[in-house]
């Protein structure tokens, strides 16, 4: 399957990684990193529930924070965790020894240059030109 035909590739949220890397990361890398992800700098675990099953999930993400705004670049496109959190409108993110609750979840599409982009952390703003960015407010 090509990136263009992949279900994660959505308008405004392009998938920039090749499909083989996506599969490798989901099958091997994430499982290896889950136990230590919350201790790696900039990395955390987002805890969310399935849209239809209600099953709890934990997904490793690289999150950027500026004040009460949390941003996650969506280089893998609009993945299941993104759809789950958008449907719920909230999630918990665990960093090291701290957990934050995020609300008012939304996606800024790739190339977005509106006023909300100025409130994003610098690393998220830099990536916004090429990928969509998931944004949430820390409650």
Image (cartoon, rainbow, N blue to C red):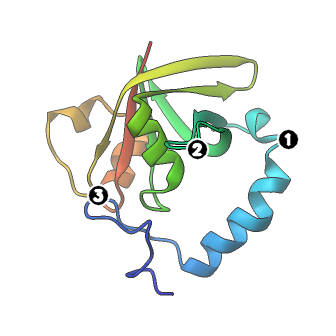
At 60% from the left edge and 44% from the top edge, which residue is drawn?
Answer: 61
Mark 1 sits on what residue?
A: 35
- Is the residue 79 above or below the residue 121 in the image? below
Question: Looking at the picture, how far across and down is residue 55, in whole percent?
Answer: 65, 38
Mark 2 sits on what residue?
A: 62
Question: Looking at the picture, how far across and down is residue 1, in whole percent?
Answer: 51, 87
Q: Sequence-wise, which precedes: disc 1 or disc 2?
A: 1
The residues tagged by marks 3 and 1 sit, at their Cα atoms, a distance apart of: 32 Å
At 43% from the left edge and 68% from the top edge, which residue is drawn?
Answer: 15
Q: Residue furthest left?
A: 114
Q: Nearer the viewer, mark 1 or mark 2?
A: 1
Mark 3 sits on what residue?
A: 129
Question: Looking at the picture, how far across and down is residue 92, in whole percent?
Answer: 58, 25
At 80% from the left edge and 65% from the top edge, which residue is drawn?
Answer: 28
Q: Residue 83 vs residue 97: left or right? A: left
- Is the residue 96 above or below the residue 125 in the image? above
Q: Residue furthest bottom?
A: 1
Q: Nearer the viewer, mark 3 or mark 1?
A: 1
At 26% from the left edge and 60% from the top edge, which residue is drawn?
Answer: 12
Q: Nearer the viewer, mark 3 or mark 2?
A: 2
Say which element carries label 2. strand
Question: Looking at the picture, how far across and down is residue 110, in whole percent?
Answer: 27, 57
Residue 60 appears in the picture as rendered: yes
């Amino acid at each position: 399957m090509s990136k263009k035909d992949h279900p994660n590739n959505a308008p405004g949220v392009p998938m920039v990684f090749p499909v083989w890397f996506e599969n490798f990361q989901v099958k091997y890398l994430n499982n290896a990193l889950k136990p230590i992800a919350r201790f790696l700098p900039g990395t955390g675990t987002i805890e969310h529930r399935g849209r239809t099953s209600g099953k709890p999930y934990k997904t490793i993400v690289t999150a950027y924070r500026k004040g009460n705004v949390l941003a996650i670049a969506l280089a893998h496109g609009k993945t299941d965790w993104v759809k789950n959190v958008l449907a719920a409108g909230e999630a918990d993110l665990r960093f090291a020894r701290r957990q934050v609750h995020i609300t008012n979840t939304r996606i800024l599409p790739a190339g977005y240059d509106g006023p909300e982009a100025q409130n994003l952390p610098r690393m998220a703003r830099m990536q916004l030109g090429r990928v969509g960015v998931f944004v949430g407010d820390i409650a």
